[in-house]
Amino acid sequence: MALSRYDGCGETKLDCVSPGGVCFDPRFVGGDGVTFYFHGRKDQDFCLVSDTNLHINAHFIGKRNPNLKRDFTWVQSLGIMFDNHKILVGAQKTSKWNDNVDHVVMSFDNTTISLPPNEGSKWNSLVMPSVTVTRTSNTNGVMVEVANNFKVIATVVPITAEDSRVHNYNITDEDCFAHLEIGFKFYNLTDIVDGVLGQTYRRDYVSKTKVNVPMPVMGGQQRFSTSSIFATDCSASRFGLNTNRRDGVAEYPILHCSSGMKGSGVVCKK
């Protein structure tokens, strides 16, 4: 759960170091509390979560680093599928960043979602009242929830000049690589859930990453690769399968977590 339990705002503040957090380039905190990185590839889509009635893909943007064998990547948008519905949450491309300008783009079943630029403003689906979108700040922050299925908090952030200098991203004035930092909470996952993040919520999951290194990296990008933001054709797909559900197994309601050295790890206790 990447939502703060201790703020007074009804769990609407993003927390990148708790289970379900997907932030930075991109760093994941699994349902088991273990922190890892999944770099994928720029301009491609990858399956983050795939269960019988929930499938979440992420579109990665990035830059090629000639000194590395991988791209620098960030999550630009999410394609969320459940029942027969689709939700898109994305970060709009921009050159110069302005905190007062909203860079969030959203749609439900291909219809644009528009919200007044006021924290707390809310949108409800007329065809499916269980779907709500709420602004968590005047601009660049939203919470999307489907009752009894999932909640996601998404904040659009840029790559700053300081980030670029420290990490050698070589970001220019043409594109600040606006991207999403995300916190997920899941209410009703099954034990066959898969995906880069989803697999870490299974009861039998054992992390294969080297957690004792500064940047533990999860591989398997071919297994999680999908053909588009709303495709369910990754090898890890479970969407549409039938199975018996386990109520609430993935909520981890009493996990207490703290960050590791300089945020590079997470320790959780039940």
Image (cartoon, rainbow, N blue to C red):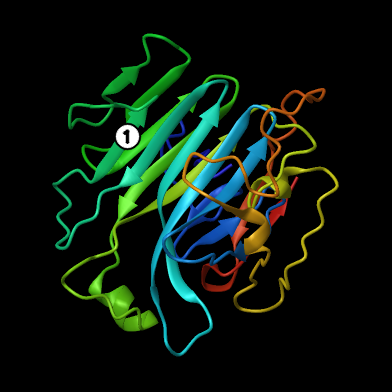
Q: Indicate the position of residue 23 as horizontal and vertical percent values.
A: 46, 57
The residue that appears at 50% across and 86% down in the rendered structure is: 68
Look at the picture and state if 124 lies above or below 224: above
Q: Indicate the position of residue 75 as horizontal and vertical percent values.
A: 43, 55
**Depth check, front residue: 217 or 44:** 44
The residue at which mark 1 appears reads as 106
Give the farthest residue toward the right. 204
The residue that appears at 61% across and 31% down in the rendered structure is: 54
Q: Secondary structure at mark 1?
A: strand
- Can residue 105 be seen by looking at this rendering? yes
The residue that appears at 24% across and 65% down in the rendered structure is: 176
Q: Indicate the position of residue 168 as horizontal and vertical percent values.
A: 36, 83
Q: Is residue 264 left or right of residue 102?
A: right
Look at the picture and state if 145 lies above or below 181: above
- Can residue 266 be seen by looking at this rendering? no
Q: Tell me the amino acid under the disc marked 1.
A: Met
Q: Indicate the position of residue 26 as horizontal and vertical percent values.
A: 49, 62
The residue that appears at 69% across and 53% down in the rendered structure is: 268
Corner quadrant of residue 74:
bottom left
